[in-house]
Image (cartoon, helix red, strand yellow):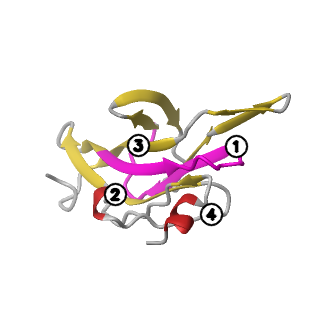
């Protein structure tokens, strides 16, 4: 993979997951770079809560470029079998230390989106909020199906 392409976006975290509960995308603005290296493969596990619903945890990785000049990044997706009333929880870690937690609502069609700052600029002083490699854990409550059980 071309390193220039990998590091050219604000936040190189565009991951498309194809599993039973829909898909997850994370990106900045219109940039989309697929992360397909084996160390960046998404990992999803489903933890049953009762006979009807389960907690689904997906872990993905992203890199925030040192030469980033734009302020925003996004995590968004669609949950095919979401349980209404439960938000999506997003946790971002660097070197196994927590750096950012968030929650966002799920629309009736299963879509969700979370927008967060990766860079701040005030009076000409730029502060990088995110720079380097991170892991993102995304927690969703889903209806139990025969395809999403461990």
Q: Which residue is mark 3?
A: 136
x then y, percent, for residue 21? 35, 58
Answer with mark 4 or mark 1, whichever residue precedes in sequence. 4
Identify the residue position indicated by label 1 in the image. Answer: 71
SS class of the residue under badge 4? loop
- What is the quadrant of residue 90 in the picture? top left
Based on the displayed image, in which of its 4 quarters is residue 50 positioned? top left
The mark that comes first in sequence, 3 or 4, is 4
Going from the N terminus, do you reach mark 1 or mark 2 first? 2
Using the rendered view, name the quadrant where residue 7 is placed.
Answer: bottom right
Q: What residue sits 37% from the left and 67% below the top?
A: 36
* Front-most of residues 123 and 88: 123
User: In the image, which residues are magenta?
Assistant: 57-85
Query: Which secondary structure lies at badge 1?
Result: loop
The disc label shown at residue 40, or none: 2
Assess disc 2: are there few (<14), some (14-19) or many (≥20) residues with their C-alpha within 10 Å of its C-alpha.
some
């Amino acid at each position: 993979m071309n390193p220039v392409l990998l590091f050219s976006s604000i936040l190189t975290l565009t991951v498309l997951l194809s599993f039973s509960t829909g898909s997850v995308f994370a990106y900045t603005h219109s940039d989309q770079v697929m992360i397909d290296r084996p160390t960046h493969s998404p990992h999803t596990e489903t933890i049953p809560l009762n006979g009807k619903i389960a907690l689904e945890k997906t872990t993905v990785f992203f890199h925030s470029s040192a030469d980033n000049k734009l302020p925003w990044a996004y995590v968004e997706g669609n949950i095919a079998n979401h349980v209404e009333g439960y938000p999506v929880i997003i946790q971002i870690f660097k070197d196994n230390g927590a750096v950012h937690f968030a929650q966002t609502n799920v629309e009736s069609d299963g879509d969700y989106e979370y927008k967060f700052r990766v860079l701040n600029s005030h009076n000409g002083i730029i502060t990088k909020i995110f720079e380097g490699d991170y892991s993102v854990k995304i927690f969703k409550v889903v209806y139990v199906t025969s395809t999403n059980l461990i």
